[in-house]
C-alpha cells in the first residue's frame, strides 16, 4: 500500500476528529469524546500550540494520525507524550501504525527527548505486541490515574 505521512494542517482536523471518534468506539468509550474540530484547530494551530500532529493519507483520505505533545519528567528531563496513534480499521495490518510510530520516534529524537510515553489498553494485544517488538517497555505494574472535570471538582470540594 502506498500511503504518505505528513505534518497535519488545520484543514485536516475534521478528518482527525473522525479518527478520534473511531478510536473512541474501538475503545468502547464512544460517548466520552468532548473535543471538537474547533478545539483541535485552536489548540493545534492557534497562538498557543498545545500539540503536534502527523496524518497519514491513502488515496486522498486521512487514514491515520499521531497526536503528541511535550512534557517534562522530573527523572529524565524533556520527554514527549503520544496521546493517540490511530489507524482506521481498514488500514490495520498495513504497516501504517509502525510508520506513524516511527515518525513520532524520529520527532522525539530530533528534539533530544529522553523518553516517549503513551498508554495502551491491556486488552489491545496486537498494539502491545507491536510496541514490544519495537523495543518499547509496557509498564504493567503502573496504573493510569485521571481526574476528569467532575473528579477535579470533587477533589476541590474535599480539601
Image (tube, rainbow, N blue to C red):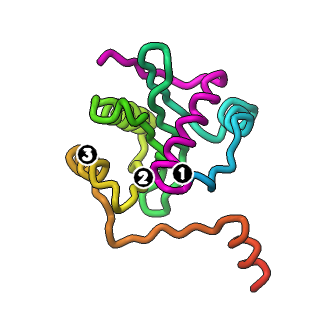
Give the residue drawn at x 47%, y 53%: 27
* Rendered position, 63 above or below 50: above
Can you give x and y, in whole percent of width and height, for residue 9 in the image? Answer: 61, 22
Given residues 56 and 141, the one toward you in this image is: 56
Q: Are marks 2 and 1 in contact (CB under 8 Å)?
A: yes
Q: Quadrant of the N terminus?
A: top left
Asked which secondary structure carries label 2, the reply is strand
Chain-order first, disc 2 or disc 1:
1
Q: Nearer the viewer, residue 62 or 90?
A: 90
Q: Is residue 99 visible?
A: yes
Q: Residue 113 location in percent, x, y?
A: 43, 44
Q: Residue 15: within the magenta?
A: yes
Image quadrant in which you'd find residue 121: bottom left
Residue 159 seen by the camera: no
For discs 1 and 3, the disc positioned in front in the rendered view: 3
The residue beneath circle 1 is: 71
CB contact under 8 Å: marks 1 and 3: no
Crowding near the residue tagged with mark 3, few <14, some 14–19, many ≥20 C-alpha atoms within 10 Å = few
Residue segment shown in magenta:
1-29
- Mark 2 crowd level (few <14, some 14–19, many ≥20, 10 Å Cα): some
Q: CA distance from mark 2 to mark 1?
A: 9 Å
Q: 90 or 87, which is in the foreground?
A: 90
Q: Please name the residue that numbered disc 2 is placed on.
A: 117
Amino acid at each position: 500500500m502506498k500511503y504518505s505521512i505528513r505534518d497535519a494542517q488545520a484543514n485536516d482536523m475534521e478528518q482527525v476528529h473522525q479518527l478520534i471518534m473511531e478510536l473512541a468506539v474501538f475503545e468502547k468509550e464512544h460517548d466520552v469524546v468532548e473535543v471538537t474540530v474547533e478545539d483541535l484547530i485552536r489548540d493545534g494551530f492557534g497562538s498557543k500550540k498545545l500539540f503536534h500532529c502527523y496524518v497519514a493519507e491513502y488515496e486522498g483520505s486521512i487514514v491515520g494520525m499521531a497526536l503528541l505533545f511535550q512534557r517534562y519528567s522530573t527523572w529524565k528531563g524533556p520527554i514527549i507524550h503520544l496521546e493517540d496513534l490511530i489507524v482506521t480499521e481498514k488500514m490495520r495490518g498495513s504497516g501504517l501504525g509502525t510508520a506513524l510510530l516511527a515518525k513520532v520516534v524520529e520527532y522525539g529524537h530530533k528534539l533530544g527527548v529522553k523518553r516517549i510515553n503513551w498508554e495502551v489498553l491491556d486488552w489491545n494485544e496486537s498494539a502491545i505486541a507491536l510496541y514490544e517488538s519495537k523495543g518499547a517497555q509496557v509498564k504493567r505494574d503502573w496504573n493510569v490515574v485521571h481526574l476528569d472535570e467532575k473528579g477535579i471538582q470533587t477533589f476541590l470540594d474535599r480539601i
